[in-house]
Amino acid sequence: MRINDTWRGALILGAVVIVFIIGAIALSEHGLQKVSCVGRALAGGVALSNIHSVCGL
């Protein structure tokens, strides 16, 4: 039972962090374009370490 609670907590925490990151990008200048660029880059198989340079974050 504790392992399930630990995984559930980790998933919730991860989701909250992702929402904050996407929100911060979306509220920046040209934010929605950057969020869509990140989404396209991830869907296209760009490495996480290269998204910053690809999307101009």
Image (cartoon, rainbow, N blue to C red):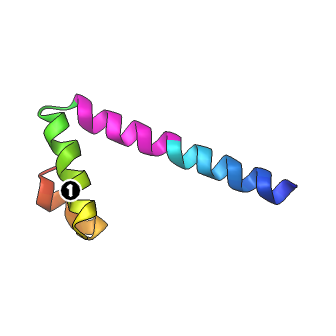
- Residue occupying image coordinates x 31% and y 35%: 24
Q: Considering the image in quadrants, where does the N terminus appear? A: bottom right
Residue farthest to the right, as pictured: 1
Picture quadrant where residue 49 is located? bottom left
Q: Is 48 situated above or below 23?
A: below
Dominant secondary structure (helix, strand or loop) of the stretch shown in magenta? helix
- Residue occupying image coordinates x 75% and y 54%: 6
Query: Where does residue 7 sit, x and y in percent of width and height?
Result: 70, 56
Query: Where does residue 44 sit, x and y in percent of width and height?
Result: 21, 67
Picture quadrant where residue 28 is located? top left
- Residue occupying image coordinates x 13% and y 31%: 29
21 is within the stretch colored magenta: yes
> Which residue is nearer to you in this view: 49 or 37?
37
Q: Secondary structure at mark 1?
A: helix
The amino acid sitting under disc 1 is Arg
Q: Is 41 situated above or below 11?
A: below
Left or right: 17 in relation to 32: right
Magenta region: which residues? 16-27
Residue holding disc 1: 40
Residue farthest to the top, as pictured: 27
> Which residue is nearer to you in this view: 25 or 42?
42
Query: Where does residue 2 sit, x and y in percent of width and height?
Result: 85, 55
34 is within the stretch colored magenta: no
